[in-house]
Amino acid sequence: MNWTRQILCFLVLSFIHVIYADEHNHIYNDNEEVVLWMSTIGPYHNRQETYAYDSLPFCSGPKEMIGHYHETLSEALQGIELKFSGLEIDFKVPVSKTVFCGIDLTEDRVKAFVYAIKNQYWYQMYIDNLPMWGIVGQLEKSDDGISYYIYTHKKFDIGYNGRQIVDVNLTSDITRVKLIPNAHITFSYEVNWIKSNVKFEDRFDKYLDPNFFQHRIHWFSIFNSFMMVIFLVGLVSMILMRTLRKDYARYSKDEEMDDIERDLGDEYGWKQVHGDVFRPASHPILFSALIGAGYQVTVVVLSVIIFAILGELYTERGSMLSTAIFMYAATSPVNGYAGGGLYARMGGRLWIKQMLLSAFMLPLLVCGTAFFINFIAMYYHASRAIPFGSMVAVTCICVFVILPLTLVGTILGRNLAGTPDAPCRVNAVPRPIPEKKWFMEPLVIILLGGILPFGSIFIEMYFIFTSFWAYKIYYVYGFMLLVFVILMIVTICVTIVCTYFLLNAEDYRWQWTSFLAAASTAGYVYIYSFYYFFFKTKMYGLFQTAFYFSYMALFSLALGIMCGTVGYFGTNAFVRKIYSTVKID
């Protein structure tokens, strides 16, 4: 499939995923062709290290022509390779045990099968989008040594309800053959059709694990996070209603009093920096680009979660990634509007440079990480290697979709939201920042700012990691939405508290501090990923290690940008509120 066809398929199928969460109608007539797709094969403990099914010397069935082939951009990016098995399967037509091919076991073929058995290779297949898994073979230890056996028979039990397939089961350990060089082995299959009462919309329930995802600790973590929200909201309310009220009363006194500084004590107060608090942040191009990207990522994450709740995207291969790519491209104007407007309010003039950085910052990081993994995957001949056509398709999406939409958003942001509107006049000369206690330094605040937000999502991170890096299908997106809302609230409250103490120490560098204090949550998530890798998984090898830590760094970076933006958004509203209320001469 050439790259132009991939782009068209991506746009069409992404739209269909979002609206219907379905790429086929899944309706069959009697005797109609049912396609068995052979997908990938790889070691059980390295889920992401996958290879093409025919990388092992299996043979395929005699049938060569089928009614349709399909491949989407998201499947190619995920390393999902679908190849026709060559087996004759028709709807409601049983097949007795039938030999479909045979191979001669040469020395190289025996070595390949032995290596796969030693590393517990599993393979994956699909019938009507329903996955099945089978193991290549097994080893047995005896007094004579170790013997290796390969399973040569596949038994398919397919359940149907009306004209739809609702269940598939594979039994592959019925017949086994010892691996002996120069021997000839045959492969066989059989198909049984069983009438089922399972409804089509419930056919994925067998793959879900409610005992894992809805465990009591999951509910306890939600309750714990909810109580944290109540505490932090109460703390922020106390600051706003009590502490600030005292500050207002204190600042309303006659400012010509000689003992005013004595009344203030060691803390001179946040009012003293009113002439610098709305000074543009350092490195405004980078800051505004991060804020713009953060707004976009936040909208994309929220949209994908909602679509996953409404459309059950986990039931379709690649639908989650397709939806995420589609939403990221479609929400590019949000990036341009937020970043471009903020840069204009800061007085920036290099708006084209800012727009390019805002539009391509995340895509370049994603593509750079993917290309790095791609080189390793190509060295290992793994299916995770991204085809050249898919690379071209992604590049075209960035250049011809994301960039123009970001440009539109930037122009709108500069014209509609680019007028400076600071409540206080900015001094021409920056005020010196006085010395303060070590725990009030911005670096310390940044390091401490992410602890509570990380604590609010700690348990959910374990479930998300397990669903991606282990054999679990994540489907409790209602939990995820609730945790997402809790994370946003906790992040805003924490950054407001941190900013209040920073301003009270007469340090007006709140923009970057609020952003990085919230973004430091991602640092703790990445540290936790090390613990998860070494103590919760059995992953091994260069490929899996590089794949894991590279994509976890990318995930943590996106999470940090999102949390940082949310923290800055809440803090900006707080700062504007307190300085617009106090009368400043």
Image (cartoon, rainbow, N blue to C red):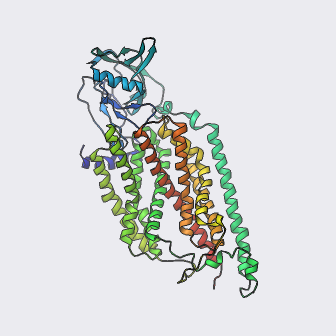
- Give the residue displayed 41% in from the left and 40% down from the top: 542
Determine whether, in the image, residue 544 is placed left or right of residue 182.
Answer: right
Q: Quadrant of the N terminus?
A: top left
Q: Residue at x 59, y 78 (%)?
A: 432
Q: In the displayed structure, would residue 366 be above or below residue 403?
A: above
Q: Position of residue 506 (x, y in %)?
A: 63, 74
Q: Position of residue 434 (x, y in %)?
A: 63, 75
| 395 or 310: nearer the viewer | 395
- Horizontal placement of 154 versus 264: left or right? left
Q: Quadrant of residue 443?
A: bottom right
Residue at 61%, 41% in the rendered image: 218
- Residue ranking furthest to the top: 143
Q: Position of residue 328 (x, y in %)?
A: 41, 55
The foreground one among 217 and 287 is 287
Q: Residue furthest front?
A: 144
Residue 106, given in percent of the width and then of the height, sits at 27, 20
- Where 211 falls versus 98 (above or below)? below
- Vertically, is 400 above or below 198? below
Q: Is residue 191 visible?
A: no
**In the figure, is residue 99 to the left or right of 507?**
left
Give the vertical position of 176 relative to 257 (above or below).
Answer: above
Q: Quadrant of the C terminus?
A: bottom right
